[in-house]
Image (cartoon, rainbow, N blue to C red):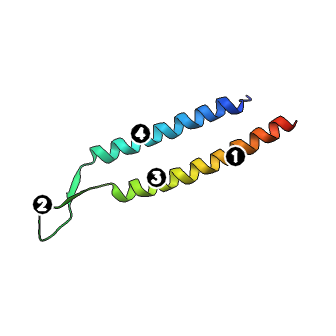
Amino acid sequence: MKYTPEKLSHYILYALIGVTVAVFLAFYLAGTETTGEIYDQTTAPVLVNFLIVFLIAMIVVTAIVAVWMLLRTFFMRGK
């Protein structure tokens, strides 16, 4: 099955949005943990490190997909 670049980019965008929503829901629903040993009132969200790594990975993946789609479009128009 042959997809047009516009349709393929829509599917990729929907997939990226879906994964992002799932990660942020997990971040907000996971809760917090006590971080300080002296003061028990200090808390931090559980998935902070995962969220930071995920955001960096999504920026890299989005940049790669954008370049790939741009090159794919140029090569398709050239034929």
Q: Secondary structure at mark 1?
A: helix
User: Residues under labels 3 and 4: Cα distance?
Assistant: 12 Å
Q: Give the Cα distance between marks 3 and 1.
A: 20 Å
Marker disc for residue 41: 2
Q: Earlier in the sequence, mark 2 or mark 1?
A: 2
Q: Residue at position x 34%, y 56% from top?
A: 48
Residue kind at label 1, given as amino acid type: Trp
**From mark 2 to mark 1, how far is it between C-alphas?**
48 Å
Residue at 57% in and 50% down:
61
Judging by the rendered image, the residue that carries numbered circle 1 is 68
In this rendering, the answer to whether 1 lies above or below 50 is above
Report the residue marked by disc 4.
Answer: 21
Mark 3 or mark 4: which comes first in sequence?
Answer: 4
- The residue to which callout 3 is attached is 55
Q: Is residue 40 above or below residue 76?
A: below
Rounded to the nearest whole Å, what is the CA distance between mark 3 and mark 2? 28 Å
Q: Earlier in the sequence, mark 4 or mark 1?
A: 4
Proximity of marks 3 and 2: CB atoms separated by less than 8 Å: no
Residue 67 in picture, x, y percent from top left: 68, 48
